Image: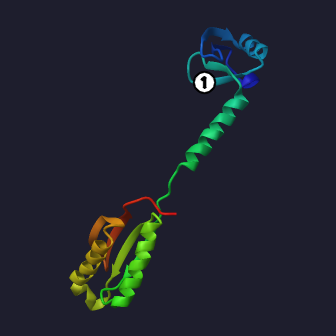
Amino acid sequence: MNERIRASEVRLISEKGEQLGIKTIKEALTIADESSLDLVEVAPQANPPVCRIMDYGKYKYEQEQKAKKAKKHQTFTVIKEIKFRPKIGQHDYETKKRHVERFLNQGNKVKVTMMFRGREMTHTDLGKKILEQLADELQELGTMEFRPKLDGRNMIMVLAPTSKPSK
């Protein structure tokens, strides 16, 4: 920028985007000073380097505003996890189902884990049945993103919300 540019000749572009041709660095600086703007090197790898006349402070400010706006419109996907056991009681099942409903209503994905211990590993079909029952009961709130699959001693299923979060 301005006096920090080390090249002897530069290809100059005006503030309106017109090419002014190849100028010496002193000529380019005087043209920039006359219009009370900055001389900014935009393509240092070119031969000769390309410089543009612009209001650098305004340019930086606009870039910051663009970045803030992009950050504001970002959405974060949060994955909540709830754990079940194959020998779960009906009341416990209903309570955990309400938690899953709440997570889906908030717009979060839910990772449902069925944990097996010891001899329960021989009855993985019972765990799969419970997970599929949960998905069927909650199908108006969320869709099954990943079907139940065995991962070591755990069976994992992911539910994603179907609609936007209700605030």
- Indicate whether 15 appears above or below 119: above
Q: Quadrant of residue 81?
A: bottom left
Residue sitting at x 52%, y 50%: 74
Q: Please indicate whether residue 127 sits to the left or right of residue 30 in the image.
A: left
> Where does the image place residue 34, in percent across and percent down from the top left?
78, 13
> Where does the image place residue 69, in percent across and percent down from the top left?
59, 44
Q: Please indicate whether residue 141 sits to the left or right of residue 12 in the image.
A: left
Q: Nearer the viewer, residue 6 or 139?
A: 139
Residue sitting at x 70%, y 28%: 56
> Where does the image place residue 77, in percent across and percent down from the top left?
46, 60
Q: Quadrant of residue 9?
A: top right
Q: Quadrant of residue 102?
A: bottom left
Q: Nearer the viewer, residue 122 or 143?
A: 143
Amino acid type, callout 1? Pro
> Where does the image place residue 27, in percent across and percent down from the top left?
73, 10
- Indicate whether 51 appears above or below 106: above
Helix, strand, or loop for circle 1? loop
- Indicate whether 160 appears above or below 97: above
Residue sitting at x 24%, y 79%: 129
**In the picture, which quadrant includes the N terminus?**
top right
Q: Which residue is mark 1?
A: 44
Q: Please indicate whether residue 131 sits to the left or right of residue 73 in the image.
A: left
